[in-house]
Image: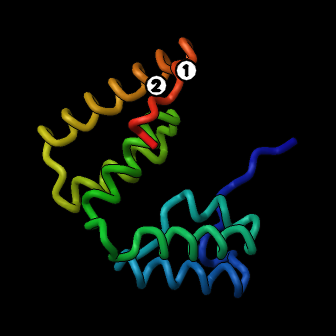
Amino acid sequence: MSRLQPIEYAEASKAVRAVFDDIKQTRNVPDVNNFWKYLAHDPVGLKRTWESLKEVMAPGALDPLTKEMVYLAVSVTNGCGYCIASHGAAARKAGMTDAMFGELMGVVGMANETNRLANGYRVPIDPMFD
């Protein structure tokens, strides 16, 4: 099986170009990053993923920095190097400082540790949490 290659704008179908154009316009960037170029192998999935991401990351009750830091925390927990790089850069662009990143990693590490302990011990949920 051959390894997939990114689909560049010049080789993209009309449907893929429409999504790429929306990403570039929404993010105010000259080109889409590799994530989208690889997802372009499935134009329906590309569009669905972009629309969902755009909706979830849109302005709302959480500010853009908080959303990016949550995304970064989940990416660290899941071990996704690509998403760590992408959302780490986005969080820094939105205002995350080195100190904030350090505290975030402390929270992520502690949450993962205590989650594993609670799961391992099969600790029942306290009635006061209901």
Q: Is residue 65 above or below residue 129?
A: below
- For the residue carrying disc 2, how many other residues have a C-alpha within 10 Å: few (<14), some (14-19), or many (20+)? few
Q: Which amino acid type is marked by label 1?
A: Asn
Q: Most extreme residue toward the top, as rendered?
A: 121
Residue that appears at 56% across and 78% down: 20
Left or right, 55 with respect to 4, comes to left
Q: Is residue 54 above or below residue 127?
A: below
Estimate the x, y position of residue 87 in percent, counting from the top left: 37, 52
Toward the viewer: 4 or 56?
56
* Spatial separation of the CA atoms under disc 2 and disc 1: 6 Å
Q: Is residue 120 above or below residue 83?
A: above
Which color mode does the image show?
rainbow
Estimate the x, y position of residue 121 in percent, counting from the top left: 54, 12
Mark 2 secondary-structure assignment: helix
Residue 71, labelled with which disc? none
Mark 1 secondary-structure assignment: helix
Which residue carries the number 1 mark? 119
Residue that appears at 47% across and 69% down: 56
Residue that appears at 25% across and 38% down: 104
Which residue carries the number 2 mark? 115
Asked if labels 1 and 2 touch by Cβ distance under 8 angstroms, the answer is yes
Q: Is residue 123 above or below residue 96?
A: above
Residue 59 found in image quarter = bottom left
- For the residue carrying disc 1, how many other residues have a C-alpha within 10 Å: few (<14), some (14-19), or many (20+)? few
Estimate the x, y position of residue 89 in percent, counting from the top left: 30, 53
Residue that appears at 26% across and 28% down: 106
Left or right, 114 with respect to 107, comes to right
On-image quarter of the N terminus: top right
Q: Which amino acid type is marked by label 2?
A: Asn
Toward the viewer: 121 or 41?
121
Left or right, 12 with respect to 115, comes to right
Left or right, 82 with respect to 14, comes to left
